[in-house]
Image (spheres, helix red, strand yellow):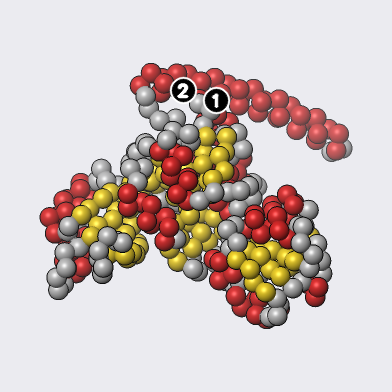
Amino acid sequence: MAIKHLRKDIDAIDKEIVKLLNKRACWILEIGKMKNKTGEAVYAPAREKEVLSKIIRENQGPLNKETLTAIWREIMSASLAMEKPLVIAYMGPRTTFSHLAALKKFGASVSYLSCNTITDVFMEVEKDNADYGVIPIENSIEGAISHTLDMLVDSDLSICSQVMLDISHNLLSKHLKDAIVNIYSNPQVFGQCRLWLESNLPKADLIEVSSTTRAAQIAAKEPRSACIASLLAAKEYGLKVVAREIEDSPHNITRFLVVGKSQAQRTGRDKTSIMFSIKDRVGALHDMLLPFKKYGINLTKIESRPSKRKAWDYFFFVDLTGHIQDDKVKKALMALEDKCKFLKVLGSYPVTE
């Protein structure tokens, strides 16, 4: 069959797709009106997961699930923007990994607010200058982001979703590798590329800055300098890719949280994050964990952090399987509350594949 005939068929399919997308958009507008009357949040993480799961189940190829997910991400992004002009805060500037995570979660149709720090992200959402904030919580190599843990202690915002972002670090510069004397990036990135740097540029000075984007801005102007940043930063600031994927581990993933003033509904495959402080006595932490064993709840993460309120006083951050609306989770947390000094539920949200 000639190419022109195949393209004619594709044009007909495209016409039908446009018609169906607009029909879908009409129903989205109706739902938006209903949500506006009831005060229901526009962004619904449980519904988001339901839609994406159905799309993946229905897929019979040749498109893979990653491609279909990316397509539907933009469809849902446009839908959110139609219901309400959402603003998403992230730790900027543009092209940081926080920015990339925000784009992965909310797509290109919503508005974004760049913030200087994690604290600023929380503040902009709390002041209603943004609807949601996207913040890093942990990296698979470097561990927890302490600043985020500290902010979760006092903030009234809830975790309603999460984003997993595969992290790829690249050496960017306007110069060849042998001419580079200064390399800019943030401290965590240097930690994730330590072996490559020692093997390939052992004499270069590693200079810490606030973000990978700031590093790219400096490298674009300063002679004999380079940065470690994303490929998007190379495009944004006119830098050449000197070396790709220089991270020491191929399994470099950063987990980001979405925080806001709304709660995520139960999906059946959820995670709940809590924090608590314990009484200063022998076996106290052991006793804290017993309710979870009793009710068969799996703990996927335990992280300790100094409370900063009293010497040798710690907060414990725990991720557990289940939703706060699940009976066994409710019972376990009630039992835990009787044993600890302080307990705070940070939020329940869908599990991300």
Establish if 43 lies above or below 139. above
User: What is the number of the mark on residue 63?
Assistant: none
Q: Position of residue 205 (x, y in %)?
A: 67, 74
Q: Which amino acid type is marked by label 2?
A: Gly
Q: Which amino acid type is marked by label 1?
A: Met
Q: Label 2's element?
A: helix
Residue carrying label 1: 82
Residue carrying label 2: 32
Q: Position of residue 206 (x, y in %)?
A: 64, 72
Give left or right: position of 174 versus 79.
right
- Along the viewing direction, whichever of 18 and 29 lies nearer the viewer: 29
Give left or right: position of 235 versus 30.
right
Q: Label 1's element?
A: helix
Q: Where is residue 238 in the image (x, y as percent from the top left)?
A: 78, 53
**Picture quarter containing residue 45?**
top left
Establish if 296 lies above or below 43. below
Establish if 252 lies above or below 338. below
